[in-house]
Image: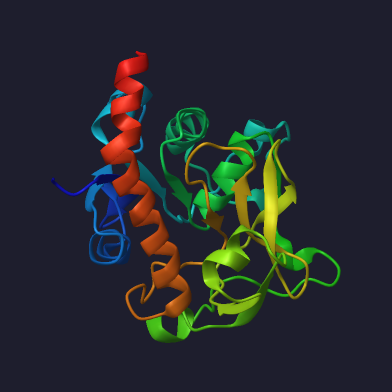
Amino acid sequence: MTRPVVGIISNSHLINDEYPAHAGGTMNSEAVSMVSGAIPLLIPADPRLMSIEELLDICDGFLLTGGRPNVHPEEYGEAATEAHGAFDRARDAITLPLVRACVARGQPVMGVCRGFQEVNVAMGGTLHPEIRDLPGRMNHRMPPDGTLEEKFELRHSVRFTRGGVFHRLMGAEEVVTNTLHGQGIKTPGARIVIDGTADDGTPEAIYVRDAPGFTLSVQWHPEWNAANDPVSRVLFTAFGKALADWRACGASSQLKSA
């Protein structure tokens, strides 16, 4: 049996500030291939180029990656301000309906950083534009200077709900992660379960209640050093198992019911 295929949602990018491209971090593809055991397939985040139905047929699951642009606040009923930063409406138009379709079908989907926020917004939640401006919150943003190793170093702990999904998966009630985000969950969407938080109360781990498939998503970046970091490896391994299960059973069930 061939390996499952994971659609990795790309980000809009300009090469040399003028040539438009669809970009994806190498570490995302490496984590999917080397830890999840799947074939990474970079998906252009542009609804003009494909439909959600086509993506669901081609891919066994999806990784919603991080990205510099943020989900547009109109997607959760708020007006855009300077604090909301840059946007990528084409990516919004792909990821938000894709999340809802995956949840309904039981098709595996994992959100990372912006992807974590997309899962929340897709289910009706809202976002804070800038976490560090909230009373009592730490600065979760990526350090502006230093090497990649320094930017992705483990910086804070995440505590999971005792006996919850992440606690059982990790085999630990508390882990240490990196942190490279400005925005965060304000109100959780319908069926969104906040299963892990940072020391300052910022939501860091979620899943969709009663979803028939894998929906675990995290605010940190587990793709960094995924093969060696024990927290990242466990998460991508679980994602890989869900992908293999879908390829073996879930996809055929969808075809029979169609």
In this rendering, would 108 be left or right of 55?
Answer: right
Q: How is the image coloured?
A: rainbow
Q: Is residue 219 above or below residue 79?
A: below
In this rendering, does residue 120 appear at all?
yes
Q: Is residue 210 above or below residue 227?
A: above
Residue at 37% over, 25% down: 52
Q: Is residue 194 above or below residue 229?
A: above
Residue at 69% over, 64% down: 163
Judge by depth and name the residue closer to the eye, 211 or 54: 211
Q: Name the image quarter holding the C terminus.
A: top left
In this rendering, does residue 129 appear at all?
no
Q: Is residue 113 above or below residue 56?
A: below
In this rendering, would 15 be left or right of 158?
Answer: left
In this rendering, would 64 be left or right of 54?
Answer: right
Q: Position of residue 211 (x, y in %)?
A: 56, 37
Q: Name the image quarter holding the N terminus.
A: top left
Q: Position of residue 106 (x, y in %)?
A: 46, 34
Q: Position of residue 136 (x, y in %)?
A: 84, 72
Residue at 46% over, 50% down: 110
